[in-house]
């Protein structure tokens, strides 16, 4: 009985599927290979059937019509559970995911864990991608981290090894039918406390056939991220950050009044002191409330970084105020709140990704070892 099932979704991949199957066979591992095809019309099906006559361990699941990558992966995972294997690998059919790297994923696998073949950890690489494609992937991964709270650096990768126990727990919660399923799986896994680790891979752009990732796929990816944002703890985090910001305004106002009226300081000196007092206020609330789940790094270095983001924030506010007023011709009373809102988002991003940054594997942080 093979312990590993390799699930390969295919849609018109005749240019590479034969070579991929032979490469997997020659690894000499005890694998079961499951091809999930969505009505390919280019001869993919015939090539798989041929290969499965030569090798006894290949199954073809024909779905007949294009129902989406995510839906194909879900069917594949379900079928793999019924095979009674211990691990399920998913990979693309276009040789972007190197079969020779499979053993390295398996090395780190276990029944309760997900191993991501990651392009964005040390040792991971991308070959042959255009600047546009790199940018799309970078933004997608940044948004995924920001909106779902999953700490992985590569949450859109399709080269993965799932432990069956992890699959069993996650499957019932999934809804995605397209590319968005990849991040949905990780978001659910994160919520259920499933361990996620990353192992470096080299992603090579396909040399045959065409990518199926279009604008429609990107749109449903964004919609899914918004839904996950509302269901994960991340919406609450953004709300806490906002409330802390408002509390800072109040603290600032009270302190400047106290120092000027009761202590008798010159109001500009009071203003400088009250600004720093409100920064300390915001820092403490954010540290022990907004980002209380992020303990990495020393308190002092976090405080220094937080102060730097505020200094940067002031500079950016003034710059935007000038741009909006003089370049766009807006009234300065309109430019100002616009600048403040933009800088607020900027502050949140810096706080999230820098001041209270999270190591790739979450607080344990052993994911890239
Ligand atoms: N069955 C089925 N149905 N398979 C599909 C479908 C579908 O609707 N759409 C795509 N596939 C298959 C392709 O045949 C290929 O084997 C694999 O899914 C990946 O599709 P590509 O079209 O090659 O995607 P890509 O290279 O643009 O995207 C890859 O990188 C992304 C991250 O940057 C994939 O690994 C994605 O999963 C990943 O999110
Ligand atoms: Mn591809």
Image (cartoon, helix red, strand yellow):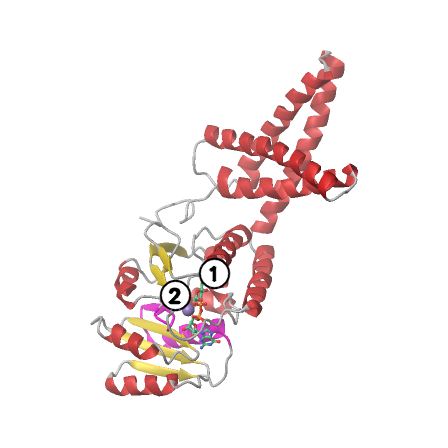
Q: Is residue 41 left or right of residue 200?
A: right
Within 8 Å of ligand 2, the CB of disc 2? Answer: yes
| Residue 356 visible in the picture | no
Residue in front for this viewpoint, 162 or 37: 37
Tell me, for residue 182, which label it has, or none. Answer: none
Q: Give the residue furthest to the front.
A: 327
Please tell me which of labels 2 and 1 falls first in the chain.
1
Left or right, 200 with reference to 142: left
Nearer to us in this view, 104 or 283: 104
Residue 64 visible somewhere in the drawing:
yes
Residue 205's tag is 2
Q: Mark 2 and mark 1: span between their CA atoms?
A: 10 Å
Residue 294 in the image: state x and y as whole percent.
Answer: 48, 41
**Residue 346 on the magenta span:** no
Which residue occupies the foreground of this view, 319 or 90? 319
> Residue 277 at x, y = what percent?
62, 24
Q: Which residues are magenta?
A: 68-95
Residue pictured at 44% horizontal, 72% vertical? 73
Q: Are marks 2 and 1 in contact (CB under 8 Å)?
A: yes
What secondary structure is marked by label 2? loop
SS for callout 1 = helix
Residue 81 in percent (x, y) is at: 38, 73
In the image shown, does 312 or 352 lie closer to the viewer?
A: 312
Queried on whether the Cβ of the residue with tag 1 lies below 8 angstroms from ligand 1, the answer reads: yes
Q: Is residue 187 above or below residue 351?
A: below
Other residues around mark 1 within 10 Å, as few (<14) / some (14–19) / many (≥20): few
Residue bearing mark 1: 133
Q: Residue at x 77, y 41 (%)?
A: 334
Decide: is 105 above or below 291.
below
Which quadrant holds the N terminus? bottom left
Residue visible at 31% across and 76% down? 33
Image-quadrant location for residue 195: bottom left
């Amino acid at each position: 009985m093979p312990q590993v099932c390799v699930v390969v979704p295919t849609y018109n991949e005749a240019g590479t599927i034969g070579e991929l199957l032979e490469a997997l066979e020659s690894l000499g591992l005890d694998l079961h290979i499951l091809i999930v095809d969505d009505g390919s019309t280019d001869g993919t099906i015939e090539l798989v059937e041929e290969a499965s006559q030569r090798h006894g361990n290949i199954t073809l699941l024909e779905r007949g019509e294009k129902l989406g990558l995510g839906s194909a992966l879900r069917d594949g995972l379900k079928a793999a559970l019924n095979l009674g294997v211990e691990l399920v690998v998913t990979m693309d059919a276009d040789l972007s995911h190197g079969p020779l790297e499979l053993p390295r994923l398996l090395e780190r696998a276990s029944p309760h864990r997900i191993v991501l073949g990651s392009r964005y950890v040390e040792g991971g690489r991308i070959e042959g991608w255009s600047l546009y494609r790199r940018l799309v992937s970078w933004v997608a991964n940044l948004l995924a981290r920001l909106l779902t709270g999953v700490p992985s650096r590569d949450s859109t990768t399709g080269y993965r090894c799932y432990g069956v126990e992890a699959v069993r727990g996650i499957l019932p919660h999934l809804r995605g039918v397209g590319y968005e399923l990849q991040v949905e799986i990780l978001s659910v896994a994160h919520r259920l406390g499933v361990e996620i680790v990353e192992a470096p891979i080299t992603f090579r752009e396909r040399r045959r056939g065409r990518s199926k990732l279009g604008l429609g796929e990107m749109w449903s990816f964004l919609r899914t991220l918004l839904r996950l944002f509302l269901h994960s703890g991340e919406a609450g985090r953004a709300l806490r950050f906002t409330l802390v910001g408002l509390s800072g305004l109040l603290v600032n106002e009270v302190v400047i009044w106290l120092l000027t009226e009761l202590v008798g300081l010159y109001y500009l000196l009071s203003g400088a002191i009250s600004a720093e007092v409100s920064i300390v206020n915001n820092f403490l609330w954010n540290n022990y409330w907004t980002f209380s789940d992020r303990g990495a790094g020393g308190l002092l270095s976090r405080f220094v970084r937080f102060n730097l983001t505020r200094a940067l924030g002031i500079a950016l506010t003034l710059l935007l105020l000038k741009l909006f007023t003089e370049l766009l011709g807006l009234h300065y009373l309109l430019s100002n709140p616009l600048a403040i809102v933009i800088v607020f988002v900027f502050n949140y991003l810096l706080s999230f990704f820098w001041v209270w940054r999270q190591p790739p594997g979450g607080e344990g942080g052993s994911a890239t070892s």
